[in-house]
Image: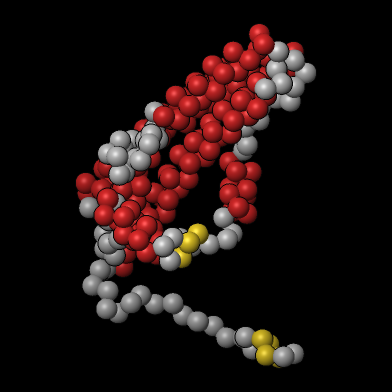
Amino acid sequence: LIKGKETLESTVTLVADPKNPHSAEDRKLKQATDMRLYDDIERLGYVGDQLVALRDGAKKAGEKAPAASKAKLEAFGKAADKLRGSFVASGDGYIGGDEKLREFLGTLYGNVISYEGRPSPAQIARRENLESEIGDVEKKFADFVAKDVAAANALLAKAKLDPLEVASKEEWKNKDQTAGSAPVRLDEETVEQIAAQAPWIRSLIRSFRIEL
């Protein structure tokens, strides 16, 4: 505490809520599962954002590229969209019922963080299955970068245009944190509409900087 030129220091001991009926072991497992699922969502978000950036970068480059290269860059953009579409729902997602890996992961995360106790064995098993699918997505993305992005950049080099770049995960996280420093504001009606289809959304509102 700083009061004028005076600085006062003390220590604070954090203790579990005495009203919480769950054991320390259960709370520890819950916290670890919360964070692991959060990291899983981040892993998938990174791949999805890079694919969008590559698609948009190819589209922009195509506007300046020779006609012979333009069609190949358009095909590249479609390939990036197709890969992203394999794990991200198109259209309304939750509301439209077209759920894929990202939506399944979000639902599991919401269910786990909304309960203060130990995740169920079924939830743990579900997390492991989804993490296996995330690994598959990451491998496909790495192959896409090694083959398709390299080929697109070879075209751009011949046209003397800037290459497409894939940000490192650290670069992506730093940019995301900077862009997300301002709070997101949702009106109550919008929240109610979303919550009607995805009840766990209220848990996300409590976990992130989302203001009503």
Q: Is residue 198 left or right of residue 182?
A: left
Is residue 19 shown above or below 210? Answer: below
Observer-nearest of 196 and 37: 196
Q: Is residue 68 left or right of residue 75?
A: right
Q: Is residue 47 left or right of residue 65?
A: left
Residue occupying the far front of the picture? 189
Is residue 1 shown above or below 196? Answer: below
Observer-nearest of 28 and 120: 120
Residue occupying the far top of the picture? 68
- Tell me what residue is drawn at x 54 percent, y 83 percent: 11
Is residue 68 shown above or below 45? Answer: above
Name the spot of residue 204 as percent of width and height, x first. Answer: 38, 58
Is residue 16 shown above or below 171? Answer: below
Q: Is residue 207 visible?
A: no
Residue occupying the far right of the picture? 160
- Tell me what residue is drawn at x 22 percent, y 49 percent: 121
- Tell me what residue is drawn at x 54 percent, y 16 percent: 75
Name the spot of residue 68 as percent of width and height, x first. Answer: 66, 8
Q: Which of the colour schemes (rainbow, by chain, secondary structure, one colour) is used?
A: secondary structure
Quadrant that contains the N terminus: bottom right
